[in-house]
Image (cartoon, grey):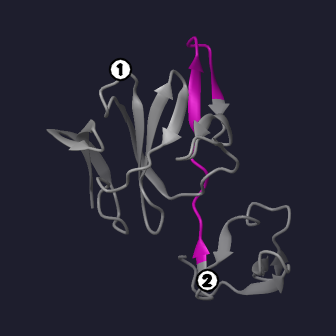
Amino acid sequence: MDQPGTRFSFENDGQQGKRISHVNGRPVAGTPDEHRFVVRLDGGISELGEPDTILLNKMGRRFERIPQAGPMFRDAGGAAISDEFRDWGLSARFHDLNRDGLQDLYVCNDFETPDRLWLQVTPGVFQLAQDRSFFPAEFFSSIGGGIVPTSTGMGGMTYSLWICFP
């Protein structure tokens, strides 16, 4: 958070525990700040990023926003994503990483949010990759990315290695 003088008020909602109710004396319910800050388990406060936006080009005439929550994006278990990720997205790249003929999506994130690899499992449907062992180191600023012409086999699949440069 870049404003050290920011003041927070809290309330305990019973189920989710402590949550932020006011920022600088203003209520957050129903405002853009409602989901901007969260109370961490250690009692500190983290500021979340804006939800990433994917725009689908509709025949060169207009763009349509594709929500993360819905049928197009699935979690690692295959269930539809129920809420949008509020990551600190920096860059994204489509590339057929697992060589199945479908363009996969890699999103480089910043701060405490992990990079995410979405494998396109059928045309237009992306599933969050289960195997995180080949991801770059977390908690570094990822300002760019590139596909390296090296391949590595993991879990019986072959991936091109993606590197986010800190």
Q: Residue 101 carries which label?
A: 1
Estimate the x, y position of residue 68 in percent, counting from the top left. 63, 41
Task: Identify which residue, 61 or 16, lies in the foreground.
Answer: 16
Estimate the x, y position of residue 102 in percent, counting from the top left. 40, 23
Whether residue 16 sits left or right of residue 61 in the image: it is right
Magenta span covers which residues?
46-64
Label 2 to label 1: alpha-carbon separation? 42 Å
Residue placed at 37% from the left, 55% from the top?
132
Q: What quarter of the picture does the C terminus occupy?
A: bottom left
Estimate the x, y position of residue 13 in percent, counting from the top left. 85, 79
Estimate the x, y position of residue 46 in percent, counting from the top left. 58, 75
Location of residue 140 (image quadrant): bottom left
Task: Identify which residue, 27 or 112, lies in the foreground.
Answer: 112
Vertical comparison of 132 with 19: above or below: above
Q: What quarter of the picture does the N terminus occupy?
A: bottom right
The stretch drawn in magenta includes residue 38: no
Whether residue 123 sits left or right of residue 94 in the image: it is right
Whether residue 51 sits left or right of residue 101 in the image: it is right
Which residue corresponds to mark 2?
Answer: 41
Vertical comparison of 58 with 118: above or below: above
The amino acid at mark 2 is Leu
Callout 1: SS: loop
Task: Check disc 2: other Cα within 10 Å, few if <14, some if 14-19, many if 20+.
Answer: few
Task: Check disc 1: other Cα within 10 Å, few if <14, some if 14-19, many if 20+.
Answer: few
The amino acid at mark 1 is Gly
Location of residue 47 (image quadrant): bottom right
Vertical comparison of 165 with 29: above or below: above
Residue placed at 56% from the left, 13% from the top?
60
Residue placed at 76% from the left, 78% from the top?
19
